[in-house]
Amino acid sequence: MGSLGDYEINGSLQTEDSIVITKSEPITVRPATKTDDDGFYYLSNLDIHVNFILEMLFCFKADDDRRSGGVVGSDVFKSALSKVLVHYYPLAGVLTTDSDGRLTVECTGEGVQFVEAVADCDIDALGDISKRDPALLEKFAHVFPEATSTLQAPLLTLQVTRFRCGGFVIGAAFNHCISDGTSMTEFVNSWAEIVRGAALTQKPFLDRGIIRSKQPLADCDIDALGDISKRDPALLEKFAHVFPEATSTLQAPLLTLQVTRFRCGGFVIGAAFNHCISDGTSMTEFVNSWAEIVRGAALTQKPFLDRGIIRSKQPPKIEFPHTEYSVIDAPPGSFTPFEDHQLIFRSFSFTPQELSHLKEIAMADGVINKCTTFTVLTALSWRARTQAVGLSPNQKTILLFPVDSRSKFQPPLPKGYFGNAILLMHCVCSAGELIEKPLSFAVKLIQEAIDSVTDKYLRSSIDYFEVHKPDLTFTPATFVVSTWMRLSYEDIDFGVGAPTQIGPVVLPENLALYLPRGKGVTMLLGLPGPAMDIFRELIKY
């Protein structure tokens, strides 16, 4: 089932040299006006446990009418970014720690990092990014490898890579603690609205205190970039700027943005950001706000920045076991080690017809009477991966997947809430049980986990973080699945229409990611070579 594309690290089918990216040096873009909020910005418990840099790519094609006279200029991008940062002012700050060692953002107004780049081809050369080698995709987002910690890296770095055809890719590298995927998508959409001269459709809601614990130009057209899901990360890294000199996240900017221009007028925006400042939704909203300002529009959604609304209670009250943060130790001989085998990434594409057929198979035994694309595809991939990595039948396997909790709090989080609102949910069973039982068994486990996400469970999780401060540890028995299917990236418009595709630069070994491809789905996955050979056969359900 499904078509696939593949590549290998240090042995890619589409090498990083297939597209040449020429980058400018990063510059700092500051908020257009000074805000009154120049103190410390509270990060919720949902933010601080995802303190790492996340990279996202937004790809845009320019139509023929925009190839001359209608291309978004560099000054427009930067001016709109400066304006949207007034609304998303925490992104212009720096990540630091308070006297208790807790992560926080100092709202210094220093700005975000902005990089311009040019590709030597049309954007069509990029193809489907879900089938691109991460070595290529990494060229489109700028990170700072000199940063030895997230405290040394920018909260957000944006790279705009332009293609000869007028298309472009925006690479955003941001600290996940400042935004989740939803918030980042809203940010990018706000940026695009300003680029177009439109009003913001959603201003960000920045008060994270509402969930606070209670206190006692590339040298080619953009088509040459092709499908970034099939690109080598060594290439994609050129589209997002990072600071390698940062030895920790405390030394890195919270966000670095790189805009890479192509000869065709297209461009790529690469955003490198610390996940503690934003999840994918929030970062998308930020980029959208940037685009709105680029267009000269008002922000459709101003960010809601008060993360204190999801603070933990005082004293904390843990009402659920939260075993998703427990390490599952693997007994000797429970799985085959693959340390000596090279990691291979592949993309698997599923058409709407294939997904419908898969749902019919899952419901055939009558155990479940409905299922979504996410639940059935996750059940299938969890079973296939568990068998592929060689877990013994009695070995416990854990599935982790983030759930966007914005609508699950009571009352729901305000529109434009900027930050991390994702909560990791989990399913646990023995490998033998997962593999031997029908597909409906795994689907039902996933459905029950999703249904258990209530306001009471969310509050218990926040209090659990307050008491235990868990650090996620993955073994071969752990499988993480995430989806970008619901990020509202299609609303982002810098004046050239919506992105043609979005995707990550680098994919962690234990994670599978779902990307939208038309009305179907593309799944990205990395496994050691022998395990991938098994997985690709098992996924043909």
Image (spheres, helix red, strand yellow):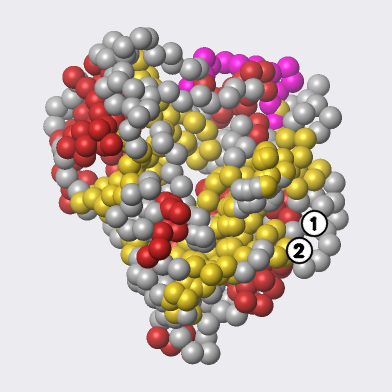
Q: Amino acid at mark 2?
A: Pro
x and y percent of residue 214 in the render?
A: 74, 27
Determine the residue positioned at 67% across, 38% down.
Answer: 248
Report the span colored magenta.
310-324
Which quarter of the rendered picture does the N terminus lie within? top left
Q: Secondary structure at mark 1?
A: loop
Determine the residue positioned at 43% across, 44% down.
Answer: 507
**Residue 359, above or below 156:** above
Name the residue carrying label 2.
Answer: 31
Q: Secondary structure at mark 2?
A: loop
**Residue 310, above or below 180:** above
Q: Residue 501 bears which disc, if any? A: none
Q: CA distance from mark 2 to mark 1?
A: 7 Å
Q: Amino acid at mark 1?
A: Gly
Q: Quadrant of residue 464?
A: top right
Q: For this rendering, which residue is in front, 203 or 434?
A: 434
Q: For this rendering, which residue is in front, 168 or 313?
A: 168
Image side of residue 113 versus residue 270, left or right: right
Magenta stretch: residue 320 in it? yes
Say whether disc 2 or disc 1 marks the residue closer to the N-terminus: 2
**Circles 2 and 1: CB atoms closer than 8 Å:** yes
x and y percent of residue 28 in the render?
A: 73, 63
Name the residue carrying label 1.
Answer: 109
Image side of residue 475 versus residue 436, left or right: right
Determine the residue positioned at 70% across, 58% down.
Answer: 112
